[in-house]
Image (cartoon, helix red, strand yellow):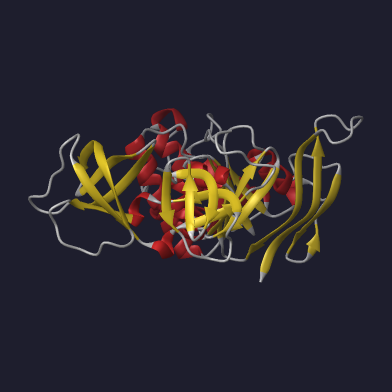
């Protein structure tokens, strides 16, 4: 069941000028209980879209529905949503208990009941016993935990999160991701989360929308978008390596002096091929193996990283990046000639489009 629907949303910089849209969303549906991500580079419109959902940013055109109810003109405080920003935005003169209880007191929840709710939620976020502290006595990570507790204690229909962990150091970010994933599993709440961090996206989201220049390019599960991006831009943004432009001829994809077997119905079609690093396997020339579905190249770089080999293989004018599990005793030297085997079924091809160029 869809809990949130956006239809024909338009938000412009200047309503007096046509086609000057900061945001233009044809449609977006988010399911109840889903952990949904809005992902894209800085300035793509993801935070503006979150504010539109929250009611903090008026739109020029379109409709917004929550639980099938049109809330397009409903003010922010009556939409039943919770929000966590990049900065915790706690009330400095209030204790932790008072900060978390703020929304409950607005709803006139009896004191005994809201104190119990606050203590329960503090245990969930790992800050039991912090009720009487003030924000100035807490670390940045602890303050953000309080901000999350304050947002979820009111049991919002949807929890909106705007890059809430971007100001934290890497170890704290991982800790907070684990916390919000735990909260999502426990409460089964709908979360809409803004980030530009690929790792965050792959770790957290059930589905996500990739945004660019105020529009949504593609929606899907992170794994599916990585494996089947609809444009080279999306592939690059998600960290896919080995994206080459060329043409399919006689069951081969050809890009300059590089070619690779690629049988399908798209002969004589120009476009981009996507050769994911994990789809290759580099082996020694002296090793026996199948001769088909492989080519030769020379090692430009070989690095070991946590049980994996990260290789760059020169094949004529192209450099192919490869990630493979490190085998005991196996190593490659710079300049060494090697075989590079590949899985044909894992090669993706994107026909030429006019919009997204490879290196924008």
Residue at image position (42%, 49%) is 259
Considering every residue shown, the one lying at the far front of the view is 250
How far across and down, in percent of the image, does residue 223 sit?
46, 59
**Residue 230 in sight here:** no
Q: Quadrant of the C terminus?
A: top right
Q: Quadrant of the N terminus?
A: bottom right
**Along the line of sight, the residue nearer the viewer: 252 or 217:** 252
**Total marks drawn?**
0
Image height check: is 89 above or below 3?
above
Q: Describe residue 347's horizontal placement relative to residue 91 as left or right.
A: left
**Residue 11 in sight here:** yes
| Res. 141 image quadrant | top left
Residue at image position (80%, 63%) is 69
Considering every residue shown, the one lying at the far right of the view is 16
**Along the line of sight, the residue nearer the viewer: 187 or 260:** 260
**Along the line of sight, the residue nearer the viewer: 79 or 209:** 209
How far across and down, in percent of the image, does residue 50 sit?
66, 44
Q: Describe residue 19's horizontal placement relative to residue 84 as left or right.
A: right
Residue at image position (50%, 64%) is 187
| Res. 55 image quadrant | top right
How far across and down, in percent of the image, does residue 357 sit?
61, 38
């Amino acid at each position: 069941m869809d809990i949130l629907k956006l239809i024909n949303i338009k938000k412009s910089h200047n309503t007096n000028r046509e086609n000057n849209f900061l945001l233009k969303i044809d449609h977006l549906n988010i399911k109840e209980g889903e952990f949904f991500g809005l992902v894209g580079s800085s300035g793509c419109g993801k935070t503006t879209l979150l504010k539109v959902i929250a009611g903090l940013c008026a739109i020029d055109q379109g409709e917004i529905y929550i639980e099938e109810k049109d809330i397009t003109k409903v003010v922010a405080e009556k939409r039943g949503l919770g929000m966590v920003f990049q900065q915790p935005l706690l009330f400095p003169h209030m204790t932790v208990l008072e900060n978390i209880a703020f929304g409950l007191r607005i709803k006139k929840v009896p004191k005994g009941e809201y104190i119990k709710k606050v203590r329960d939620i503090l245990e969930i976020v790992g800050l039991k016993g912090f009720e009487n502290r003030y924000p100035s006595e807490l670390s940045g990570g602890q303050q953000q935990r309080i901000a999350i507790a304050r947002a979820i204690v009111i049991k919002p229909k949807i929890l909106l999160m705007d890059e809430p962990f971007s100001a934290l150091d890497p170890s704290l970010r991982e800790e907070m991701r684990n916390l919000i994933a735990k909260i999502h599993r426990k409460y089964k709440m709908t979360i809409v989360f803004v980030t530009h961090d690929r790792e965050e996206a792959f770790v957290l989201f059930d589905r996500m929308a990739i945004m660019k220049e105020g529009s949504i390019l593609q929606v899907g599960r992170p794994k599916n978008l990585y494996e089947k991006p609809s444009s080279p831009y999306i592939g690059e943004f998600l960290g896919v390596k080995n994206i080459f432009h060329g043409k399919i001829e006689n069951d081969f994809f050809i890009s300059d002096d590089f070619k690779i077997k690629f049988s399908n119905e798209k002969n004589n079609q120009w476009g981009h091929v996507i050769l994911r690093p994990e789809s290759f396997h580099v082996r020694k020339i002296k090793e026996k193996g199948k001769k088909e579905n492989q080519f030769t190249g020379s090692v430009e770089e070989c690095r070991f990283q946590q049980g994996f080999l990260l290789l760059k293989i020169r094949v004529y004018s192209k450099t192919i990046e490869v990630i493979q599990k490190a085998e005991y005793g196996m190593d490659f030297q710079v300049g060494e000639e090697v075989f590079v085997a590949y899985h044909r079924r894992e090669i993706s091809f994107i026909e030429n489009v006019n919009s997204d160029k490879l290196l924008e």
